[in-house]
Amino acid sequence: MSTMERFFKLKEHGTNVRTELVAGFTTFLTMAYIIFVNPSILGDAGMPKDAVFVATCIAAALGSLIMGLYANYPIAMAPGMGLNAYFAYSVVKGMGYSWEAALGAVALSGILFVIVSVLRIREMIVNGIPRSVRIAITAGIGLFLGIISLKNAGIVAAHPATFITLGDLHATPAVLAIVGFFLIVALDRLGVRGAILIGILAVTILSFLVGGNKFGGVFSAPPSLEPTLFKLDISGALSIGILNVVLVFFLVELFDATGTLMGVANRAGLLKAGKMDRLNKALLADSSAIVAGAFMGTSSTTAYIESAAGVQAGGRTGLTAVAVALLFLACLFIAPLAGAVPAYATAPALFYVACLMLRDLADVDWADSTESVPAVITALMMPFTYSIANGVAFGFISYAGLKLFTGRAREVPVIVWIIAAIFVFRYVYLGAE
């Protein structure tokens, strides 16, 4: 225990081993869906699903382990949702590239990440994010978590005319999710340790009793990784057409992960004067995980917004991320057990975290519309475009534009102008993908 104390600086962060492990378990439960969803999506691109399952577990474990041991942040990593869909449905099925070439594009974007992280260019970009946009990133992630959780619970559903509508509140998943939400909020308010974890486990147990959930056993042998290991095609990714894909991967990964890192760190109270002390280590952990994941056979690995659930459960150090890493490795052998937790069991936890993250909007300077409007745009664009990166992009563009049109261009840092221009180029030339 003393070794862990010294390595992770637990007392300095006001936490202990038990709290960190519970936080890690909580985070894992909220993001374990990726080990089943990622193979399904990449399988549509023609990739061997069993091998992708193994690659997903190992990439998540490796990324989280680096984040925990090297950067000492309670932020878990895994192949990102959205990026895997772009990989499968846009790059492979839409543009006609092989999945091997698409993996090569992911690796190249990761190598670019490593370069800009080592040169501290990415750190400069992060530290150049205006305060109002930085605040809005946390709130926007909260809104994003909110719509994800409501969708997972079946409380909101798609509608052909209005895009979104109220789901079936008589359905068992919706009812159990609502019960779980009130249980979590009440327990947390009463000061019960592990309230979020208790809520998740309670709904999971109820799902077996009244939700028709089936127990598929505990252990299974992991499939072979060989069909995807080192199968990426770098030369194919260097072709002229796919270089645009590399750029899109790079931009989305850059601001998706950056937004998540800043938002979760802010929620954990780990920012000092609006900055992360070990930011460059976190960025290097993030970028190296992308490259490693591509070599193993999965789309871009990124920081997970579900880490906010572990932070709410008390996670403050890298021990939380290490716990997540070990659980992902265990999933190689206990996939049936990990799959027993339904999405609607973790939905209440995510929705409660979403509620808590929205309070950061109170710190926006509402008297100055050149600060408040970009903040609102940043926050709203994340759930409405289903992308953290798009929210950050429109935040930068609107911030620079409003300052320019109101004669206050000198207040805008040079790096903000550069990033805003890159995003304008991306949307005009490359489209919205």
Image (tube, rainbow, N blue to C red):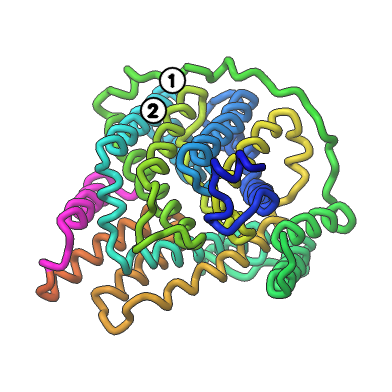
Is residue 313 among the parts visible in the rendering?
Answer: yes
Q: Judge whether 406 appears above or below 20 on screen.
A: below
Question: Residue 261: percent from the left, percent from the top?
Answer: 44, 51
Question: What amino acid type should be assigned to the residue bearing mark 2?
Answer: Ala
Question: What amino acid type should be assigned to the residue bearing mark 1?
Answer: Leu
1 part of magenta stretch? no
Which residue lies at the image location 67% right of the left edge and 38% below the top edge? 327
Which residue lies at the image location 39% right of the left edge and 28% below the top edge? 107
Question: Residue 391: percent from the left, percent from the top?
Answer: 37, 59
Which residue lies at the image location 29% right of the left edge and 55% below the top edge? 127
Q: Nearer the viewer, residue 324 or 54?
A: 324
Q: Nearer the viewer, residue 15 or 241?
A: 15
Q: Is residue 161 left or right of residue 391?
A: right
Question: Residue 126: percent from the left, percent from the top?
Answer: 31, 52
Magenta range:
409-433
For label 1, the crowd category at 10 Å Cα-Cα, with few meaning under 14, some 14 to 19 and many 20 or more, is: many
Label 1: which residue?
A: 232
Q: Is residue 13 left or right of residue 313?
A: left
The image quadrant of residue 181 is bottom right
Q: Do the CB atoms of the residues marked 1 and 2 lie less than 8 Å apart?
A: yes
Label 2: which residue?
A: 107
Question: Residue 68: percent from the left, percent from the top?
Answer: 53, 41
